[in-house]
Image (cartoon, rainbow, N blue to C red):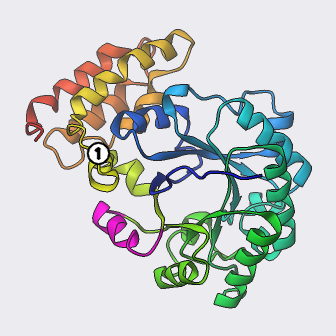
């Protein structure tokens, strides 16, 4: 099945407890071009869970669903559901190192089972026409040679038909380190990912890990097809306002962060009407004014008041008043 890949030039990483649908709706107000990812959702949750784990709004597009799982039949079933719900891509998590993930036989431990990953990718590709991609590490434990990484990529691309990989440029320790430590302690090896692109020029490869500025993203794009940013994009979302112009060549006017907040109001009111707490939405917006006088007051007001009964748009407006007049005019 021939698949055309969307632009992976810049994307925001799937982050558990962070990149939920409210976060993605907010990020979409800042950048129209960036590919957004869901939190990792397990196949078991989608198939057997009581909630709707595929909920999202069309305004978030383009959005990729990240799946956690290893059973090809379950993966294929979930991929088909995702396509039916309008997702633009399905991504398989082969990078998360947590114990809970390993116990479910998915995440980074699957790097040691390339044949199983290939089977899962093929099963999904046979069911859907949207792209099926893999997010992985450069190695696990003592299996961290470049040859090991190449063997994994070769097997999953040739046997599974995967055409797109996002490579977190650190290996993962499956025991002894927490997930947080696995994001910080194993050293970054960007050159290894660059070499992978030279050795597999026909594949679409994006890099993830430690990217903090758009200047760094531009540097990576000299070697690779795409860049995925994680925590910096979440904690300092204001930088996303520059992405469309800086990385995609858009001539759209610079995004005004105050206008971004107010663009969220119809969404917030819609969500409040269905019983969503204001704080579940505004927690993703706390870092918007980073580096601007009044940013601390903005964060404090929302942190202290958004969870209170009856918190609504007025609560956000009160927070905005603490920072809005301190923002330099857009250029």
The location of residue 187, given as percent across then percent down, is 50, 82
The location of residue 13, given as percent across then percent down, is 52, 54
Quarter occupied by the C terminus: top left
Residue 227 figure quarter? bottom left
At 42% from the left edge and 36% from the top edge, which residue is drawn? 28
Secondary structure of the residue carrying numbered label 1: loop
Identify the residue under disc 1.
250
The location of residue 272, given as percent across then percent down, is 49, 14
Position of 194 relative to 70 (above/below):
below
Position of 313 relative to 52 (above/below):
above
Tell me, yes or no, whether the highlighted magenta stretch contains residue 221: yes
Residue 283 figure quarter? top left
The location of residue 146, given as percent across then percent down, is 64, 88
Position of 291 with respect to 212 (left or right) is left
At 55% from the left edge and 77% from the top edge, which residue is drawn? 197
Position of 280 with respect to 301 (left or right) is right
Q: Which residues are magenta?
A: 212-224
Most foreground residue, 96 or 149? 149
Most foreground residue, 68 or 196? 196
Position of 39 with respect to 238 (left or right) is right
At 31% from the left edge and 60% from the top edge, which residue is drawn? 214
The answer to whether residue 30 is seen in the rendering is yes
The answer to whether residue 104 is seen in the rendering is no
Tell me, yes or no, whether the highlighted magenta stretch contains residue 281: no
Most foreground residue, 178 or 153? 153
At 33% from the left edge and 66% from the top edge, which residue is drawn? 218
């Amino acid at each position: 099945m021939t698949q055309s890949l969307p632009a992976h030039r810049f994307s925001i990483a799937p982050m558990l407890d962070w990149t939920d649908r409210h976060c993605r709706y907010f990020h979409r107000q800042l950048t129209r071009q960036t590919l957004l990812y869901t939190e990792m959702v397990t196949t078991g949750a989608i198939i057997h869970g009581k909630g709707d784990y595929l909920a999202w709004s069309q305004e978030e597009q383009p959005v990729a669903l990240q799946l956690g799982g290893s059973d090809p039949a379950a993966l294929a079933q979930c991929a088909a559901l995702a396509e039916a719900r309008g997702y633009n891509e399905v991504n398989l998590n082969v990078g998360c190192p947590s114990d809970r993930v390993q116990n479910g036989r998915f995440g980074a431990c699957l790097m040691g089972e390339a044949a199983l990953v290939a089977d899962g990718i093929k099963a999904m590709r046979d069911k859907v026409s949207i792209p099926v991609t893999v997010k992985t590490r450069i190695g696990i434990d003592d299996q961290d040679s470049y040859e090991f990484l190449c063997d994994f990529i070769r097997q999953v691309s040739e046997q599974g038909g995967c055409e797109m990989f996002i490579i977190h440029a650190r290996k993962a320790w499956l025991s002894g380190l927490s997930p947080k430590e696995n994001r910080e302690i194993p050293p970054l090896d960007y050159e290894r990912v660059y070499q992978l692109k030279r050795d597999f020029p026909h594949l679409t490869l994006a890099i993830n890990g430690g990217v903090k500025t758009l200047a760094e993203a531009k540097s990576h794009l000299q070697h690779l097809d795409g860049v995925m940013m994680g925590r910096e994009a979440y904690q300092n979302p204001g930088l996303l306002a520059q992405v469309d112009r800086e990385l995609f060549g858009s001539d759209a006017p610079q995004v005004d962060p105050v206008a971004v907040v107010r663009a969220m109001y119809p969404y917030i009111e819609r969500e409040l009407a269905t019983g969503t707490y204001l704080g579940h939405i505004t927690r993703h917006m706390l870092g918007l004014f980073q580096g601007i006088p009044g940013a601390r007051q903005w964060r404090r007001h929302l942190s202290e008041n958004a969870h209170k009964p009856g918190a609504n748009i007025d609560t956000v407006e009160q927070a905005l008043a603490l920072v809005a007049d301190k923002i330099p005019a857009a250029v």
